[in-house]
Amino acid sequence: MPAMPVGGLVPRAVEDATGHTVGNADVVVRNARIHTGDARRPQAGALAIRNGAITTVGDDADVAPLVGPSTTVVDALGRRVVPGLNDSHLHVIRGGLNYVLELRWDGVTSLRQGLAMLREQAARTPKGQWVRVVGGWSAEQFAERRLPTPAELNEAAPDTPVFVLHLYQSAILNRAALRAAGYGAGTPNPPGGTIVRGRTGEPNGMLLAAPGALVLYSTLAKAPALAPEERKTSTRHFLRELNRFGLTSAIDAAGGFQNFPENYATVTELAREGLLPLRIAYHLFPQTAGQELDDLGRWIEAVRPGDGDAWLRLNGAGENLTWAAADFENFAEPRPELGPYEGEFEKAVRMLMEHGWGFRLHATYDETIRRDLAVFEKLAAEGLFPAGNRWLFDHAETVSRESLDRIAVLGGALSVQNRLSFQGEVFARRYGTGAAADAPPLRAMLDRGLTVAAGTDATRVSSYNPWVALHWLVSGRTVGGLALRPPQNRVDRATALAMYTTAGAALTGEQDVKGVLGPGFYGDLAVLSDDFFAVPEAEIPFIESLLTVVGGRIVHAAAEYEGMDEELPPVTPDWSPVARFGGYQASTTGPGVPGVPGASGARQAELLGEVVAESELHRRWRTARGHATGPQPSFDPCFVL
Ligand SMILES: [Zn+2]
């Protein structure tokens, strides 16, 4: 592995007086501003990693004797280094299986640009394949602040099926996709969903979750899937895309259509081959309504939480235990009124507790959380809850103070996501700014001493970019720039980072080995492009990692470090949108974000601001990767600079 220039450090490998070999570090990071996350030593200048774990944290002089001929020395050039990030609620397994098939609008700042990407992708997509934009964006991030129309999709892609998913609210299909899906005047609406029709009764291309998302997912399921070998390449590229932002761990939330063990085979194989560049703790989620107890019972017989290793391990059940107990978070629609679900739900939780299984539980609204808590309290009175098991609520946007008190008594934790980065505007319109200011009540959670881990809920409802989520925690703003949470319900940057590191480690029982840069902890870290603790708040979403290390392995390297990372096979298939556009577009700031032109004024001024912002972003993006700067081709042919 190539080493960075070692200023004043002479490589050596000798034994010291006690017979220990010195100069045996695998990786040394020096000349750094390290935020350790360790209260005993919050700041440091250098660290050393051996056999995947941190051995030394100190200054350059402390690590100098550890540098030997085989040590990779990273000169951080004075940059900020943080513990590797941990997204505590990411649909990482499902995201990986589909990544190379998706055109990502994450971070795209205008619909014009999105449509230009779509047009170009449609032209390079072979017959029989679809172009799919599957979440991770919101209309509010566009200068135009609107969705594309079916007519625009038809114009951009006359013959290639196009499926565009907007949050869990709607999907827009072009004519070719309606044909490929077999939707016509005689097609009935699926339960909980609407196929919007024109005056002739023919579908016009809009699908609405009203409020259930089945109509969206079942339509997407008609598009071709990848072959098993391609799923591995797709997953590896997705995980490396996450590494690009400094992510080194994720807790998978499972999800609909994610079957065990079939859909876990890809990450399991990668783990077996030592090829995972990200640590994954996963959950098991019963797929079929009415058979949940059978599924859970079978799994309890076959596997145990904690099974696995430092890279891939089972963490329990969830985020659904029974389908009837799940409240759907389409904030554009009224809160769903759940029927009686407590009977089966209680049986499921009782079974888990009796067998040493913890769980995570999807619950958006306080109305649901209160009903769940009543079940838990009943079991607790029998001594069956939590019975030494870890458990947590996911989401909890509208959880009340009273429910938080009850969660604390029952030994629960929370996992919150920046879903309102993307749905904040519709949430505020429906429930008012007062409710939005408290959604979720971060400070009330933290003030009670609860473990509150952060994440995204990517890839369909949110983007996977952790810096967008960290920005949301700190600023309370949506990607459209709307300030939802007032200062008293925001968190400082150190707290936000802890929610993205140590808190996630606690949810998987790994708090003694993960989330902190201290001796004995995993060698998981990120050298950041900009100092998270010093950049203006509006710049936080721009941060990327320049060098990401997981277990002492360099899994992402850009700028000065380019070429130091592990090799990755090329993206397949060669027409993949990822091969052309990559993943997250480096253009997070947009109209409405403070300091960026385009928030108001004449349309002309908006467009000009957009072009300026885009070219500046593109320049920064290329500089960060060590590419040539200067005039670059734009995705939007109207705006070639
Ligand atoms: Zn959920």
Image (cartoon, helix red, strand yellow):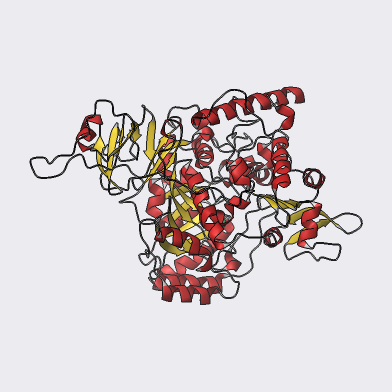
Query: Where, quadrant-wise, is the C terminus in this rendering?
Result: top right
Residue 102 position, x and y percent, is 63, 50
Residue 240 position, x and y percent, is 48, 46
For the residue pair 364 and 193, the one nearer the viewer reads as: 193
For the residue pair 535 and 179, the one nearer the viewer reads as: 179
> In percent of the image, x 39 and y 56: which residue is there?
274
Query: Where, quadrant-wise, is the N terminus in this rendering?
Result: top left
> In percent of the image, x 37 and y 63: which residue is there?
306
In the displayed structure, 304 sits above or below 627; it is: below
For the residue pair 428 and 539, the one nearer the viewer reads as: 539
In the displayed structure, 191 sits above or below 512; it is: below
In the displayed structure, 488 sits above or below 423; it is: above
Q: Is residue 181 visible?
A: yes
Relative to 170, 596 lies left or right: left
Relative to 154, 536 lies left or right: left
Residue 19 position, x and y percent, is 10, 45
> In the rendered image, which quarter is residue 54 located in?
top left
Residue situated furthest right in the rendering? 200
> In the rendered image, which quarter is residue 258 located in?
bottom right
Residue situated furthest left in the rendering? 17
Q: Is residue 537 visible?
A: no
Residue 66 position, x and y percent, is 21, 38
